[in-house]
Image: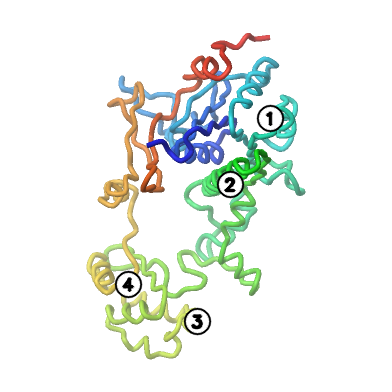
Amino acid sequence: MPGPLDGIRILDMSRILAGPFATQLLGDMGAEVIKVERPGRGDDTRAWGPPFVPGEDGGELPESAYYLSANRNKRSVAVDMSSAKGAEVIRQMAGECDVVIENFKPGGLEKYGLDHDSLRGLYPGLVHCSISGFGHTGPNAHRPGYDLLAQAMSGIMAITGEPEGEPMKVGVGVADVMCGMYAANAIQAALIHRMKTGEGQHIDIALADTTTSWLVNAGTNYLLGGVEERLGNQHPNIVPYQVFKVADGHVIVAAGNDGQFERFCGIIGREDMVRDVRYATNPARLEHREALIAELAEELKLWLKAALIARMEAENVPGGPINTLKEVFDSEQVKAREMRIAMEFPGARGGKVDLIGNPVKFSGTPVEYRRPPPQCGAHTDEVLQELLGQARIEED
């Protein structure tokens, strides 16, 4: 059955991660994605290795693991937009598409005639999504966009890390990933609006804005109560909700309400804590966090990980192990949820590459993995012939 976005064609001029991640999500749901790349060099992330794809001959292919993480279900067209002919070809391709997505700095596409205002005059129904570091307005609009900078300036790093340690970024490029998710969502909303009215529009989305939105309850704690704190693995509003050291490693305990806390105290033989007015309710536990955590830490260091997790599961107290990546991808849960997939990849060792699956599970229109991440320019002639009736670009 066709995916929910079957028939939607996207011209993807974005690079790095946010844009490609957004279009991969949309491609998984059936959209046709045409990736525009610089001839020869292509997407910057192709070279962001090692690791690179292991080759059949024992060497390596040019595509990095980083590139593979965000570029399936696309066709690659290599066009030099800095040439007049190349820019004209891209303009014509945009006219055959429903969506254009790009991540140039504000004003960066005007000289090529590929900015929103230029394309809107030609194609009023076009949805144009611009991804940048800080958006098209405000005093930081001119600044380049990098995940680390967005995490730093949005406040995420200020609340991440140990209380006495240095501010810490999240372990993956979450500013890019979240921006890509917001972009994919916004594009679909704009397409629904166009379906109702026939009107396209411009989506201006910034890494810093989307990462600021990711502050959620921690940000609202500041806005309402002036609370600004870095708690490491602890939760700002729930206690106990953190990592604890046990005799043979570490576990997560996430007692999200008073009932769960009571059952947890029963597991470790400390029913007295429930009767202690300092710990009887979550607001009280929050107020006396330091004393409570010190007591729990002494109790839990005597437990073995497997035994404690088994008891918590039996008593319906949230918690669990801290898995390594090997444990994650070897797990039966990942297998059952199809979160590890294999796709054919020409020239790769064994003819395939392993990728991370899409987390969305549709009952009627399941996601599809139709195309592996493309090699640079692999579909240039094919796409130009299909869209424009020409297989080559006549250079200036």
Q: Which residue is mark 2?
A: 189
Distance of label 2 from label 3 (alpha carbons): 39 Å
Disc 4 marks which amino acid? Val
In this rendering, the answer to whether 254 lies above or below 47 is below
Task: Residue 99 in the image: state x and y as whole percent.
Answer: 59, 34
Q: Which residue is mark 1?
A: 123
In this rendering, the answer to whether 271 lies above or below 111 is below
Distance of label 2 from label 1 (alpha carbons): 18 Å
Q: Which residue is mark 4?
A: 317
Dot 3 alpha-carbon crowd within 10 angstroms: few under 14, some 14 to 19, many 20 or more: some
First along the sequence among labels 2 and 3: 2
Are dots 4 and 3 in contact, CB under 8 Å? no
Disc 3 marks which amino acid? Pro
353 vs 27, left or right, is left
Dot 2 alpha-carbon crowd within 10 angstroms: few under 14, some 14 to 19, many 20 or more: few
Task: Residue 66 in the image: state x and y as whole percent.
Answer: 46, 36
Disc 2 marks which amino acid? Ala
Dot 4 alpha-carbon crowd within 10 angstroms: few under 14, some 14 to 19, many 20 or more: many
Task: Residue 336 in the image: state x and y as whole percent.
Answer: 27, 49
Considering the numbered disc 1 on the image, is that residue within a helix, a strand or a loop? loop
Disc 1 marks which amino acid? Tyr
Considering the numbered disc 4 on the image, is that residue within a helix, a strand or a loop? loop
Residue 308 visible in the snapshot = yes
Residue depicted at x 49% and y 22%: 376
